[in-house]
Amino acid sequence: MPLNIGIPGLILVLVIALIVFGPSKLPELGRAVGSTLKEFKKSTRDLVSDDELEKDQPNQKTEKSI
């Protein structure tokens, strides 16, 4: 299901958030959401880079000769 909010819907969501949380809590909430998204992006980037490194490196199995 595509999410097409548009400008009027976005304004409505912001007004409702302002009413529910109040003007003093809104900046704190924005910072918390921003830092959470930043950490999430960093974690996904690290996971993807680790996965790519595993694909690039050949299997390094040590064989013992008797």
Image (spheres, rainbow, N blue to C red):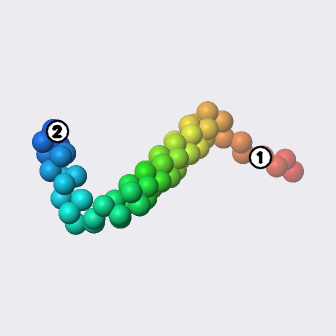
Q: Which mark is residue 62?
A: 1
Measure the C-alpha gap from mark 2 to mark 1. 60 Å
Q: Is residue 29 left or right of residue 53?
A: left
Q: Give the residue drawn at x 30%, y 61%.
A: 23
Q: Give the residue drawn at x 60%, y 41%.
A: 54
Residue 62 percent location from the top left of the image: 77, 46
Residue where numbered disc 2 is placed = 7
Residue 61 percent location from the top left of the image: 72, 45
Quarter the N terminus occupies: top left
Specify whether residue 45 is in view. Answer: yes
Specify whether residue 40 is in view. Answer: no
When the figure is inspected, residue 25 is found, relative to residue 47, above or below; the finding is: below
**Label 2 or label 1, whichever comes before in sequence order:** 2
Q: Nearer the viewer, residue 2 or 17?
A: 17
Q: Give the residue drawn at x 15%, y 50%.
A: 12
Check disc 1 and report its element: helix, strand or loop: loop
Q: Amino acid at mark 1?
A: Thr
Residue at the limit of the structure toward the top, as seen here: 56
Q: Give the residue drawn at x 71%, y 42%.
A: 60
Q: Quadrant of residue 8?
A: top left
Q: Nearer the viewer, residue 25 or 35?
A: 25
Residue 63 percent location from the top left of the image: 78, 46
Q: Is residue 63 left or right of residue 7?
A: right
When the figure is inspected, residue 7 is found, relative to residue 18, above or below; the finding is: above
Q: Is residue 61 left or right of residue 44?
A: right
Residue 36 percent location from the top left of the image: 45, 56
Check disc 2 and report its element: helix, strand or loop: helix
